[in-house]
Every structure is written in structure tokens, then in C-alpha cells.
Image (tube, rainbow, N blue to C red):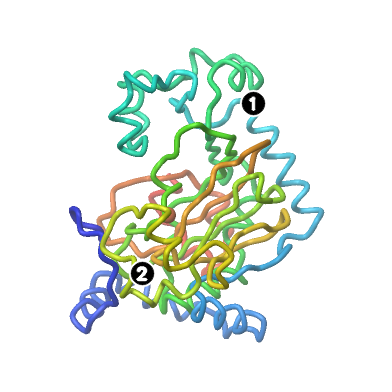
């Protein structure tokens, strides 16, 4: 697990792998539930291994996508997004200078203490929230609310690729959907970085629920940087110039996710990446974070209804931490 201030990504050595085998014994054991990969899965897996990311263009069928879009819209209008939530209207460039310089880093509670959030008692309806608080991000726990989302986040085709890549059945440790709006201040994930959620075993899934154009804040990834650890490593965040110097704009290794709604990207985010801020409109993007967890993991990052969990096939079930279903 990530410890302290070490931001250097490295390949696991023999000792690390032995430790993983013991700590994540069950995740390795669960590989027996994985069916042999189809040729399509194998093709995607090979791309993921070589590039560090694979783009499954328009992966979600149109009808299902429309259902997901309308369910998200409904959840947002029902105010089922997480609060306290950062309000751009409450950020003062002088009073909150330290916060801005610290990439707006803080838990919702810490941000609340700084006075830059709004909560349920101040939120009347969706339009009022946008007008009064100008949130940059609304986060919705869609897996708790919708069978369609649970189905997508436990899609056996995708989970098969993920398990084969990691060589184990990890847990779906985070799952949510975000609506992102234009924002004045960049937060930490808008700077180039390598993810440190886990030292060695980590994949993320991005589910595009709206068309993503240059205007609506595409995600950017440096192809091959998941294995090329000799450059741009060891620093928590990089300045744009540091990355541009090696991978100038338009470089063939810079993968920009200008994709159609319904596209799914699987990515080893230990490679260099960043989010960009929408310039106009908004971007709806679903996130899944996959990594193994130790037996005594105590957090509960989302809720997966118990009856839905019980009806999952064994392989998919192995991805959901049981404690998330209580
Ligand atoms: Fe990241």
C-alpha cells in the first residue's frame, strides 16, 4: 500500500511479489473462476500490456447507454450526489491561497472546515445548486442506485481483461460517476501524475457517459509510461512544461480521450496521466478502481446492495468486497 511521501513507481521485485502472494492470497486463488479469454479479450489485453491503456470504442450498446444517461440525469436532479461538495463560488483567491496552492487537496470534511463547500441544507434543487455554488464536480454513487450501472461495473468481458492483466482477481475498490463542469482552479488530478493508490497492482476503468471532446475535458495518458519508469517518476505532480519537453503536444505517445459516449477505457494509471477541465458544458464519466486489498481492509467506499451481490456469478462476486454489501 502507499506509504508516506514516496511517489516513485517501481516494478515489483521477488520479495514484493512474495509479499503480495501472501497478503492477497485470496485474490490469486480467485483466478480459478476466470474463464479462458476470448480472442477479443486477448487482443485488448495485449494492447493494455503494450500501451498501458486500451480504448474500447462505443463499448456500451446504445439502448443501455441511453438508460444510463437518463438514470444519471435523474439521480442528479434528485440531488443524490455526495455532499458536502466543493463550491467554486465560495473560493476566495486570497483567503484560500494555501488551499489553491495545495491543489485543492482535502477530504470533504476538511474542505467544509475551510468554508468552501455546500451541504444538503443549502441545496434546494439541481439548477439552484449550479447557479448558487458553481460546483466543479458532482459525484454520484450510481452502483447503489442502479442495476444497469452495477451490470456495467461487473461486466465479465472487462473484468476478465483486468484479472488477466493483474494476474489476480482484484477488488472493485471505488465506483462512482462524476459530472464535471468548467472550473477556475486546477486540482491535483489536473496535473500530470502517476497514481499511487497501490504500489504494484492497480487498474482503473473509465466509462464515458457523454461524448468527450477537446471542449469537455478529455483525459490524457502517456502511452508506454506504465513500464518506462526511468523518466518523469518520483515526483507527486509534474508541471506541464516538464512533460511537454519530452512529449510535446501532438506526440504520438500522448493519448487524448476524445471519444464517443459509451466508450470504456481500461488504464494502468501508474503510467503518466492527467484530467483536463471542461471548457464548456460538462462531462459525465464513470470510474472504477481495481486493486487487491488486505484481509483487514476497513473502508467502505460505496454500497453494493446485498441482493444484487448475492445474484452475481462467482467470478463477478469476487470483485465486490463483502463488507461493501452490508
Ligand atoms: Fe490519477
Query: Mark 2 falls on what kind of element?
Result: loop
* Residue 225 vertical placement versus 259 (above, below): below
Query: Mark 1 falls on what kind of element?
Result: loop
* Residue 149 vertical placement versus 102 (above, below): below
Give the camera-side residue of 172 and 280: 280
**110 sits to left or right of 248:** left
| Residue 319: % across, % down | 46, 63
Residue 61 falls in which quadrant of the image? Answer: bottom right
> At 55% from the left edge and 75% from the top edge, which residue is drawn?
161
Rounded to the nearest whole Å, what is the CA distance between mark 1 and mark 2? 36 Å
**217 sits to left or right of 230:** right
Q: Nearer the viewer, mark 1 or mark 2?
A: 2
> At 27% from the left edge and 77% from the top edge, which residue is drawn?
12
Image quadrant in which the C terminus is located: top left
* Residue 109 vertical placement versus 9 (above, below): above
* Residue 60 vertical placement versus 178 (above, below): below
Residue 326: image tag: none
**1 sits to left or right of 62:** left
**26 sits to left or right of 256:** left
Mark nearer the N terminus (1 vs 2) = 1
Residue 207 falls in which quadrant of the image? Answer: bottom right
Q: How many marks?
A: 2
Residue 78: image tag: 1
| Residue 68: % across, % down | 71, 46
Q: Which residue is mark 2?
A: 201
Give the camera-side residue of 3 and 322: 3
Label 1 lies in ligand 1 vicinity (Cβ under 8 Å): no
Amino acid at each position: 500500500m502507499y506509504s508516506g511521501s514516496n511517489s516513485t513507481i517501481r516494478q515489483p521485485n521477488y520479495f514484493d511479489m512474495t509479499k503480495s502472494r501472501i497478503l492477497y492470497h485470496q485474490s490469486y486463488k480467485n483466478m480459478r473462476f476466470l474463464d479462458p479469454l476470448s480472442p477479443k479479450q486477448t487482443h485488448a489485453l495485449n494492447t493494455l500490456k503494450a500501451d498501458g491503456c486500451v480504448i474500447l470504442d462505443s463499448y456500451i450498446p446504445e439502448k443501455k447507454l441511453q438508460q444510463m444517461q437518463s438514470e444519471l440525469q435523474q439521480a442528479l436532479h434528485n440531488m443524490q450526489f455526495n455532499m458536502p461538495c466543493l463550491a467554486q463560488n465560495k473560493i476566495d483567491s486570497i483567503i484560500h491561497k494555501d488551499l489553491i496552492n495545495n491543489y485543492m487537496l482535502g477530504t470533504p470534511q476538511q474542505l467544509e472546515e475551510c468554508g468552501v463547500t455546500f451541504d444538503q441544507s443549502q441545496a434546494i434543487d439541481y439548477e439552484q445548486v449550479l447557479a448558487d455554488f458553481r460546483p466543479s464536480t458532482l459525484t454520484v454513487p450510481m452502483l447503489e442506485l442502479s442495476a444497469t450501472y452495477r451490470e456495467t461495473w461487473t461486466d465479465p468481458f472487462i473484468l476478465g481483461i483486468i484479472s488477466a492483466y493483474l494476474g489476480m482477481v482484484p477488488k472493485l475498490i471505488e465506483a462512482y460517476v462524476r459530472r464535471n463542469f468548467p472550473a477556475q482552479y486546477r486540482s491535483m488530478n489536473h496535473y500530470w501524475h502517476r497514481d499511487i493508490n497501490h504500489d504494484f497492482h492497480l487498474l482503473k476503468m473509465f466509462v464515458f457517459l457523454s461524448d468527450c471532446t477537446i471542449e469537455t475535458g478529455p483525459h490524457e495518458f502517456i502511452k508506454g509510461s506504465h513500464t518506462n519508469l526511468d523518466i518523469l517518476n518520483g515526483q507527486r505532480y509534474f508541471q506541464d512544461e516538464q512533460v511537454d519537453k519530452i512529449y510535446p503536444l501532438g506526440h504520438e505517445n500522448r493519448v487524448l480521450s476524445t471519444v464517443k459516449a459509451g466508450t470504456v477505457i481500461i488504464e494502468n494509471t501508474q503510467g503518466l496521466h492527467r484530467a483536463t477541465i471542461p471548457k464548456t458544458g460538462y462531462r459525465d464519466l464513470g470510474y472504477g478502481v481495481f486493486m487487491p486489498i488486505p484481509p483487514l481492509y476497513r473502508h467502505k467506499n460505496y454500497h453494493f446492495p446485498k441482493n444484487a451481490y448475492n445474484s452475481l456469478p462467482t467470478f463477478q462476486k469476487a470483485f465486490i468486497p463483502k463488507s461493501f454489501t452490508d
